[in-house]
Amino acid sequence: MDLVTLGELILDMFPAELGRRHAEVSAFRPVPGGAPANVAVAAARLGAAAAFIGKVGEDPFGHFMADVLAREGVETRGMRFDPDARTTMNLMAQPDANSYDCLFYRNPGADTRLRPDELDVALLAETRAFHFGSLSLTDEPARSATAEAVKIARSAGALISYDVNYRPTLWKSPGEARDQALALIPSADLVKVNEAELALLAGEGELATASTALLALGPSLCVVTLGLAGSYFRIAAGGGHIPGFAVKTVDATGCGDAFIAGLLWQLAPNSGGKGDWRGRLTLEQLRPALRYANAVGALTATKQGVIPSLPTAAEVEAFLAVR
């Protein structure tokens, strides 16, 4: 397995109109979502053997989304169905095409109820890369399940990728979010943040200074997504800015998920040895890898909805060929 992701598979409810608050939206359209699930599908579209681990409700939405992943070629044997909790829902409002506000319905959501004993250990032990985000750290038992999954994959030599993916409304306070997010950073090899998340974890400051502070906690690579401006990276040997691509943005939702899938596919492809990703964390190899990831993210912004807009490897190669 090239990539295993763990976390939330939820129902994103997209608004019928841009520029309206939640209470003003006339209708919502259900679309499968959840950052780790999006990453798994994006990687599969690019050619990776990808699997998803997580819990949904024993309800029509949960089974519908599991079927969507399976049709996309994502291995779903690590999914669990909870008869006592509903599939989590996220009602979205979009002030404009480049931003969105989330209103999560968890009471509790099935995604928070994944237990350590429900993990598919074989999947975790065989994967080249393992990816997770902070939404599975908000509540127990999913928090403990995530930590255990990281431990299993890391001990087997996988690249551990962590998307901080801060959603304020799911935490009691920014302080709690910061503490829980920081707890697993020492176990990660790659940490992905946006500028606001970087400030939350490392304080205000220049990208180089703040990202270096995160590296000091243990990771080998810190990547900062910059929206239309592209991305920034930092390793011990240095770092730099990788420009983005100008596209006509229709919907920026999920661009970060597509980006990290593209980057992981460049760092841990299905060729060479399982631990070869360590040798790819160089200034020379990271620049083209991040340019590729920027392209995957940019293409995702050109259509509405995350999974329908994720590009194939051929589409990314054609895009880069003329840029």
Image (cartoon, rainbow, N blue to C red):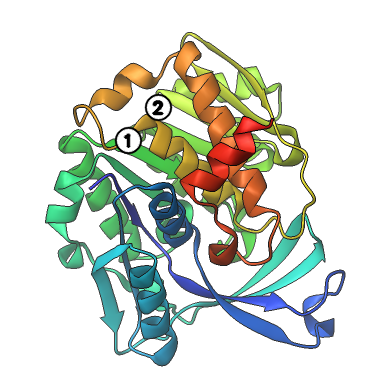
Residue 1, how many percent across, how many down?
A: 22, 48
Would you say 222 lies left or right of 209 here? left
Residue 216, how many percent across, how many down?
A: 45, 20
Callout 1 secondary element: loop
* Figure check: 106 above or below 309: below
Q: Residue at x 29, y 69 (%)?
A: 114
Q: Nearer the viewer, residue 229 or 204?
A: 229
Amino acid type, mark 2: Pro
Q: How many marks?
A: 2
Q: Residue at x 15, y 37 (%)?
A: 156
- Sequence order check, earlier mark of 2 and 1: 2
Residue 47, how many percent across, how many down?
A: 37, 48
Q: Residue at x 86, y 74 (%)?
A: 20
Would you say 64 lies left or right of 241 here? left
State the residue position of label 1.
269
Q: CA distance from mark 2 to mark 1?
A: 20 Å
Q: Which mark is residue 219?
A: 2
Amino acid type, mark 1: Pro
